[in-house]
Image: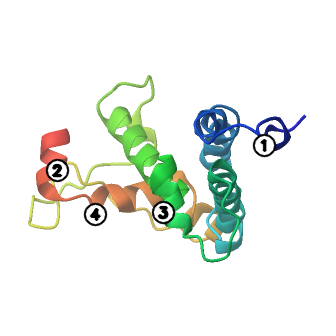
Amino acid sequence: MGLKTKLKDCSSKPKPTAYKTFVRSILEYAVAVFNPYTKCNINKLERIQKKASRFIFNKYGRKTSISELYIQAGLPLLQNFKKTNRLKFIFNLINGNYNLGYQDYFHFNPSRVTRNKHSKSISEIKPRTDCYKYSYFPRVIHVWNAFPNKLSVQIV
């Protein structure tokens, strides 16, 4: 049986826990593995979370604000989750927390530290195809280099 049919008569307290346990974990895995970059595919994954937030509070009206339901349920947007996870992974990779050599994937920018570049800025990758352009390393390097200088020095 589905989660919606099993929990349709219960209050809204156990619904977020059930959603985070059974659905959100699969969604997070899908976002990490599938890594959608087209609006169409991103919207398909976000639609699942929108339906879940409406289900949690039993508010299916058109005038109900989805963003307010997200906040009430404590559900972050999948886009924010993706960005956070990418930054966590590259941070751990740079600091040697994984048994992978980052030298095979990217190199640090040898130029000096400026207002816009921190000491751990990475050389940009220039992909030729969309398939590689939206893959993990070109996307995360762009986000990592855009990280503010003060924060990157404190983190690294």
Marks 1 and 3 in Cβ contact (< 8 Å) = no
Q: Which mark is residue 151?
A: 2
> Which color scheme is applied?
rainbow
How far is the residue under mark 3 from the one under mark 2?
Answer: 29 Å
Q: Is residue 12 above or below residue 44?
A: above
As shown in the figure, which amino acid type bears the numbered disc 4? Ala
- Sequence-first disc among 3 and 2: 3
Residue holding disc 4: 146
Labels 1 & 4 near each other (Cβ < 8 A): no
Relative height, residue 120 to residue 139 (above, below):
above
- Give the residue drawn at x 61%, y 65%: 37
- Provide residue 140's location: percent of width, then percent of height: 43, 54
Give the residue number, with chain letter if any, for mark 1. Answer: 8
The answer for how far apart the CA atoms under marks 4 and 2 are is 11 Å
Residue at image coords 66%, 45%: 27
At mark 1, the secondary structure is loop
Element under disc 2:
helix
At label 2, the amino acid type is Leu
Mark nearer the N terminus (4 vs 3): 3
State the SS at label 3: helix
**Where is mark 3, residue-wise?**
68
Q: CA distance from mark 1 to mark 4?
A: 44 Å
Which class describes the residues within 10 Å of circle 1: few (<14), some (14-19), or many (20+)?
few
Crowding around mark 4 (Cα neighbors within 10 Å: few <14, some 14 to 19, many 20+) is: some
Mark 1 vs 3, N-terminal side:
1
Instruction: Measure how far apart labels 4 and 3 are at the Cα level.
Output: 29 Å
User: Which residue does the image show at 54% across and 70% down from the upper left?
Assistant: 65
Of discs 1 and 3, which sits in the foreground?
A: 1
